[in-house]
Amino acid sequence: MFKKNLRQVKTSAPLRNSDRRALRDRVVRGFCPNEPENGDELVPEGILSQKITTSAGIPGIVYLASGGDPLWFTIGRDSEDLIPTVYTLWKWPVLIPTITVPAPVIPILMNGADLMAAGNDDFT
């Protein structure tokens, strides 16, 4: 999931029901406010949390499905920013906006160029 190995990975522990509901509410507020019924699928019953420390020494939390699949994570001490994993986006591609670019632009973006959308500043 990360480019470099994590410095520290602690064992996973199940979330309390109150914490799961709070996480579900954060996910619904941030990613699907018009479809709150999807909250239970995005934050399933039996979800686990696992504390991590990145190679740069930054703490974070990974939220895992009961089978061990990573669903969400936060980076930074007391961070409220939930980030969906690639696995979550694969299962729920509508969580974030899709941007279509012409094929010749892709190699330029892969070399590190910024994507600029004329007249739209919603992506900053």
Image (spheres, helix red, strand yellow):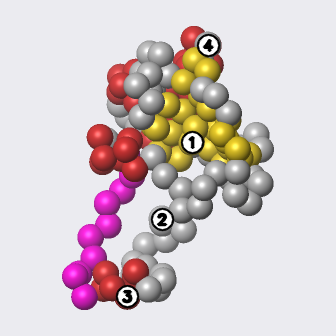
The residue tagged 2 is 122
Which numbered disc, 2 or 3, marks the residue closer to the eye?
A: 3
The kind of residue on which mark 3 rests is Ile
Q: Main secondary structure of the magenta part?
A: loop
Residue 77 visible in rendering: yes
Kind of element beneath mark 4: loop
Corner quadrant of residue 117? bottom left
Q: Which residue is mark 3?
A: 108
Q: Is residue 22 visible?
A: no
Give the labeled residue for mark 4: 16
Indicate the quadrant containing the C terminus: top left, top right, bottom left or bottom right: bottom right
At horizontal 47% and vertical 45% (from top left) the residue drawn is 84
**Distance between the alpha carbons at the discs numbered 3 and 1:** 29 Å
Q: Which mark is residue 73?
A: 1
Q: Quadrant of residue 80?
A: top right
State the residue in front, 24 or 50.
Answer: 50
Please, what secondary structure does the residue beneath circle 3 have? helix
In three-dimensional space, the C-alpha distance between marks 1 and 2, rounded to whole angstroms, equals 23 Å
Q: From which residue to which does the magenta span run?
A: 95-104
Frontmost residue, 34 versus 96: 96
For label 2, the crowd category at 10 Å Cα-Cα, with few meaning under 14, some 14 to 19 and many 20 or more, is few
- Among numbered discs 3 and 1, the one appearing first in the sequence: 1
Evaluate if marks 4 and 2 touch, with contact meaning CB atoms under 8 Å apart.
no
Q: At 37% from the left edge and 44% from the top edge, which residue is drawn?
A: 87
Question: x, y percentage for residue 104?
Answer: 25, 88
Q: Earlier in the sequence, mark 4 or mark 2?
A: 4
Pointer 1: residues within 10 angstroms few (<14), some, or many (20+)? many
Q: Is residue 24 left or right of residue 51?
A: left
Residue 97 in the magenta stretch? The answer is yes
Identity, as a three-letter code, of the amino acid under mark 2: Asp
- Within-10-Å neighbours for mark 4: few <14, some 14–19, many 20+: few
